[in-house]
Amino acid sequence: MDLAKACNQNPTRPVDQLVLDLLRRYEGLTVIDLTDKLEVTATAVRQRLDRLESAGYIERRKHSAGRGRPTYSYLLTDLGWRQVGVTYTDLAVALWTEISDLEDLPTKEKLIGRVSKRMGRVFGDLLPAGTLDERMRALAGLMASRRIPATYLNVDGLPILSVHACPYPDLSGRDAERSLCKLEQQVLSEAIGQPIELQCCKLDGHGTCQFTPTQKNPPSYDSPESSSLHSAVTAQS
């Protein structure tokens, strides 16, 4: 997937949303199919399809029949499915609850590690090659495109990724051991290809969760250095 498309945060027009809703119900519709269902002209349908394809919400597939002109059917992309509101919250809650309830600690940690690596690779494959700054900036944009409010800043040469809301609100209240915080840190580390650490956390009363590249002597969450760092980022957010 193209990162520019993935980071497209422009809301769809109501008339375009109707197309997405139809493609959610009926996969592989053609221009003629959509013309009939929407009761508009083929030109209007093509304009809507062009906008949605440019935004990365749909893709088209070519169908050739003999020597005649090929026809195209349209389907939702992964980004399109997210746009129409597909959710796996119930499944995620059930799976996380089962993992959290495991009494075998090594098995539990191994599962969380494997899940975080897989999730991190998904994010990493969508990021452009480049410097650490460029990848962290792109990661913030990618998270924002998935409706996870995140921003990137560089404070005195230190790259900082700030996550302003928990990506897993339905799970964090069930996570007394903060395994989700560890998972998120591992996911982001895998995504950018370098270890990062959680410098401050919303669960400790901070305004955001802030991640920075691992340092040899990182400041503690309650140290003056950590507090001043948080204040600097908050002032620039």
Image (tube, rainbow, N blue to C red):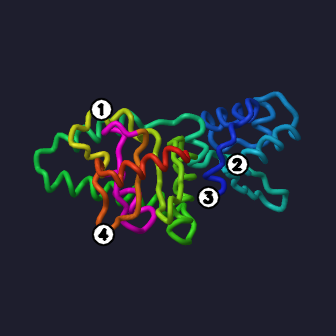
Residue 79 is labelled as none
Q: Position of residue 55 (x, y in %)?
A: 70, 48
Q: Position of residue 213 (x, y in %)?
A: 40, 64
**In the rendered image, the vertical position of residue 202 relative to residue 71, given as above or below:** above
Determine whether label 2 and label 3 are within 8 Å by CB.
no
Q: Amino acid at mark 1?
A: Gly
Please report the residue visible at 57 percent of the width from the left and 42 percent of the height from the top.
Answer: 81
Q: What span is in magenta?
A: 183-206
Instruction: Mark 4: give few (<14), some (14-19) or many (20+) Cα within 10 Å.
Output: few
Secondary structure at badge 2 equals: loop
N-term-proximal mark, 2 vs 4 = 2
Front disc: 4 or 3: 4
Q: Amino acid at mark 3?
A: Leu
Secondary structure at badge 1 equals: loop
Please report the residue visible at 40 percent of the width from the left and 68 percent of the height from the top.
Answer: 194
Instruction: Mark 3: give few (<14), some (14-19) or many (20+) Cα within 10 Å.
Output: some
Residue matched to label 1:
173
Say which quadrant the N terminus sits in: bottom right
Q: Name the residue nearer the viewer: 18 or 101.
A: 101
Q: Name the residue nearer the viewer: 86 or 187.
A: 187
Q: Name the residue nearer the viewer: 223 or 126.
A: 223
Residue 55 is labelled as 2
Q: Position of residue 138 (x, y in %)?
A: 56, 59
